[in-house]
Structures are given as structure tokens and as C-alpha cells.
Image (spheres, rainbow, N blue to C red):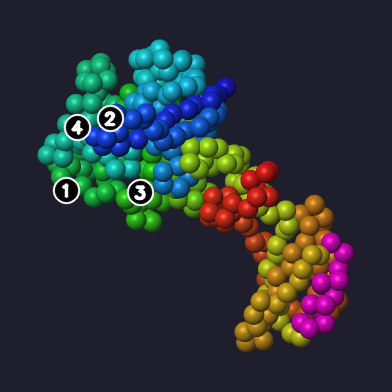
Amino acid sequence: MNTVEARDVRKSFRRIQGLRGTFRRPDFDVALAGIDISIAEGEIFGLLGPNGAGKTTLVKILCGLTIADQGEVHIAGHELSEGLKARRCIGVVYGDERSFHWRLSVRENLRFFARLYRMPKQKVDARIDDLLSMVGLAHAADKKMLGFSSGMKQRASIARGLLHDPPVILMDEPTRMLDPIGAFEIHSLIREQIAAEGRTVLVATNLMTEAEVLCDRLLLIDRGRPVLGGTVEEFRAAIRRDTVYRFMIGGQIGGALQLLAAAPGVHEAKCESVRAGVAEVVVTFDSNSNVLPSIIRVLVDANVEIISCSKEDVSLDQVFRAMVIERPEALCAR
């Protein structure tokens, strides 16, 4: 069952033109131009794109803060137009959280938001204790948030998003202001606590490494338009049909390199470096052919020492550059 469904979502904003623009036909900037997404229960879905791609606009539409010009949105079986029924199913976490009262403790802040959610008073304190324990803030529950680090503030923001126990969590760049250690801790929290309990999570980010380690499926958008969707492996396959292996080889490789290049199914074999008698050889072959055993046999027969052999995967950063920055015509037509 899909917990989040969006079909043909479109949004434009009127361009600010100053006083002279008052007497002219208005111009509009397109923020979203027909976005479709479907996210299953318990899935972590990554919304990728460069700055200004429309990620935050889509998150705001999904949580009801911005009204789409066109399209349909369903959250946990409710149309977003139903108002509170749909919004009660949503928790939102922003990377630059500014809605907390910094002179209050995190416990006092969560009590305040619990009243806004109209949660039963007898359940509020127990729920807050559980959440603070989950996000690792139990030790700081009664400290003023004014002295919180960026990581602690982000954890508090996650606790607030989970306060009313929604089935859907929308996260807009949740690790934007965090160092690598803080980002790793938030990733672990999302995977092992939030999604593991069956919640649907949407993470909007422009950090490809974050999407690679965190998300089950991805959608890349640029200038409000969908560019590519699928799993991480499907993203990699979009720009590379070949398989690449990197060998570290000891011994004389001149003859072995020629034999590798002539082997059936091998597209290219080249030596990239030689250090202290160890050569780094890169072999490229068709992904649909199983020629790796033959390659290893060629090297063994050539009496060279195979020190290591590793597959070279395409990173999402490479996919991002190819699909958004370089964007060759061949890829645009895919």
C-alpha cells in the first residue's frame, strides 16, 4: 500500500517585478511542472535535486503549507484537501528549524506543540519521555535549548515531528547543518528507529552520499521537472552499461595487459599506475556478460600476482553530474 501519492503536481509563483510590474501582465516562475511520486509504507524515499530544483516547494505542498496549482495528493488514504484528517498523518522536520522557543527546555517546547496537536494531557509526558529517549536527548530534557548544538536541535526537531505519532514523516534537508558524525547519527536514527517502526519517510536532499546510504528509492528533479527515478542501482545503470573492475597486480603486466584487451567481452584494459612494482589495472566489460572468471584466468596464466580485485560502482554524485550538470542529449532522451 502506498502511504503517499502525488499525481501531476504543478506550482508556479508570480515573479516580483516592482512598481512597474503592477501595470504589466504578470510573469511566473515554474517551481514544479508535473511531479508524480508514490511511496510505500515503511519506505525511505529520497527527493534529490540541486538548489532551486523545487524540493522544498514539493515538501510544503505535501504537508499542506502551500497549495498546488494543479494535481492530487493523498496521504495515508486521505486527500490533502480533507484538511485535518490528512495533516494529522504528517510530521515535518526541517534542516534549519526556527520554530522552537530557545529559552525554554526541549520538554517545555514539546509540551507546547502537544497542546497544538490537541494530544490528551494524560499521555503527553510519557510520549515526550519516550521520544527524548529515542532521539538521545533524555539527559538534556530540562535544559534550555539556547545552549543546544546543531545536532541536538535537529534531534529535538525529529522528536517534535514524531510527537503525534504520524505514519508519514517529511524531512527537508535534515542534516544540512550537521558535521559527518552528526549526520551519521541522524541517518541511523531514521533507518533504525523511524522507518523501522513502519513509518513512511521522505527525505529531500541535495547530498548524494546521504541519499545513497539512506534511501530505498529516489526521484531526481531539476527546475521543477522529473529527471530520473528508481533505486540506487537503477540510477547507476542510467549512465553506465559497462562493468568496471580494478585489479592490483604484481609482476610483469605488459603481456597480460594485451591478453586482457583481446579477451572476449572486454571493452578496455588499461594500466592506470605502477607503484613499488604493483600495477593498478582497470578492466571494462559488458555488464550482461560473465567474463570475470575468464579475466582472472588470463591473469593467472600470465603468471602475475593478483593482489586485490574490486568492482568500481558509479556514485550518485556521478549520476547527478551526468543528469543535471552535463546532461548529454543521449541521457535526456532516455
Please identify the dominant SS of the magenta region: helix
Give how far across and how far down residue 136 sits, in percent: 31, 43
Upstream in sequence: badge 1 or badge 3: 1
* Left or right of 277 in this view: 149: left
Write down the residue under mark 4.
109
* Residue type for callout 2: Thr
Density class for disc 2 (Cα within 10 Å; few <14, some 14-19, many ≥20) is few
Q: Which mark is residue 147?
A: 1
Q: Residue at x 53, y 37 (%)?
A: 225
* Residue type for callout 3: Arg
Density class for disc 1 (Cα within 10 Å; few <14, some 14-19, many ≥20) is few
Real-space CA distance between mark 3 and mark 4, rounded to the nearest whole angstrom? 22 Å
* Residue type for callout 4: Asn
Labels 1 & 4 near each other (Cβ < 8 A): no
> Which residue is more in the foreground, 240 or 145?
240
* Tag nearer the camera, 2 or 3: 2
Real-space CA distance between mark 1 and mark 3, rounded to the nearest whole angstrom? 19 Å
SS label for mark 1: helix
Say which quadrant the C terminus sits in. top right
* Tag nearer the camera, 3 or 4: 3
SS label for mark 2: helix
Q: Which residues are magenta?
A: 253-265
Upstream in sequence: badge 1 or badge 4: 4
* Left or right of 297 in this view: 33: left
* Left or right of 274 in this view: 74: left
SS label for mark 4: helix
User: Outermost residue toward the left?
Assistant: 103
